[in-house]
Amino acid sequence: MIDLYTAATPNGHKVSIALEELALPYTLKVLDLAKGEQKMPSFLAINPNGRIPAIVDRDQGDFAVFESGACLIYLAEKTGQLMPSDPKGRSCVLQWLMFQMGGIGPMMGQANVFYRYFPEKIQPAIDRYQGESRRLFGVLDGHLKEREYLAGDYSIADIANWAWVRTHKWSGVAVEGLPHLQRWLEAIRGRPAVQRGLLQPPSARDLTQDEDTARKFVEQARTMVEMGQSAKTGV
């Protein structure tokens, strides 16, 4: 049994989707990030960095794994699925996983902060992060021109990148003019396990048609951004 400590974020959904794809039994433990539950001592004992997601494998002596990419690798290797075992195939998957963790995630995350959450609109920062996100989308689109998935068969690399790219509207980044990326987005969105994983837990990002829900989501996110700034400055 796996305990999944998570919240409704792209990084959290990466792991819930993987667990659903792998058909592994798990217990969902949703943390309220706006209340700072990820900074509580009980969770810091699992992830000293105080971020979601993290997993605890009860079948392996309560073995804890933090960082979303590390969780994906652990689950893939535990089951022998969603990542090849041969060195070249494994490397291809890990390369595109690192692409998400070092590029797509950070750039879209910063786009969200400056475009959605930061109280002051700093246009050069918005342009910078939206532009770099779009450039990375172009890299994905070019790579997907000749292949169905990022690294051969469907893998944790697809899950990781898709969980972020699917939220492109929230970041203010368009996917028009990127037909191969759009095809890939739709193909993965249609997988039943992916649809189930997105509900563990559901995200307000998917409810932006509801202005009140979206407003509350932004307010909570802004609170977290301000808390982070206070921690950095000591305020």
Image (tube, helix red, strand yellow):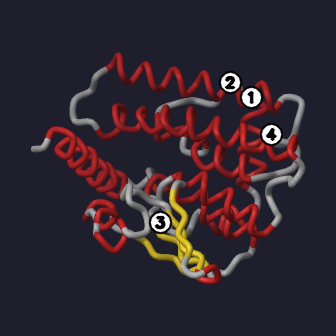
For mark 2, what is the residue? Answer: 138
Name, please, the residue furthest toward the left. 235
**Which mark sits nearer the N-terminus, 2 or 3?**
3
- Callout 1 amino acid: Asp
**Which mark sits nearer the N-terminus, 2 or 4?**
4
- Are the two marked residues, 1 and 2, in contact with CB atoms closer than 8 angstroms? yes
Q: CA distance from mark 4 to mark 3?
A: 27 Å
Q: Dot 4, how many residues are within 10 Å of its Cα: few (below 14), some (14-19), or many (20+)?
A: some
How many marks overall? 4
**Residue 82 to residue 174: above or below:** below
- Callout 4 amino acid: Cys
For mark 1, what is the residue? Answer: 141
For mark 4, what is the residue? Answer: 92
Point out residue 140 in the picture as x, y percentages from the top left corner: 72, 31
Q: Nearer the viewer, mark 2 or mark 4?
A: 4
Image check: 228 left or right of 46? left
- Are the two marked residues, 1 and 4, in contact with CB atoms closer than 8 angstroms? no
Please name whichever residue, 43 or 24, is drawn nearer the observer in this view of the structure: 43
For mark 3, what is the residue? Answer: 6
- Callout 3 amino acid: Thr
Point out residue 202 in the picture as x, y percentages from the top left corner: 50, 65
Q: CA distance from mark 1 to mark 4?
A: 17 Å
Q: CA distance from mark 3 to mark 1?
A: 29 Å
- Residue at 79 percent across and 58 percent down: it is 82
Q: CA distance from mark 1 to mark 2?
A: 5 Å
Please name whichever residue, 179 or 27, is drawn nearer the observer in this view of the structure: 27
Q: Quadrant of residue 235?
A: top left
- Residue at 42 percent across and 32 percent down: it is 111
Point out residue 179 in the picture as x, y percentages from the top left corner: 76, 30
Name the secondary structure under disc 4.
helix
Q: CA distance from mark 2 to mark 3?
A: 30 Å
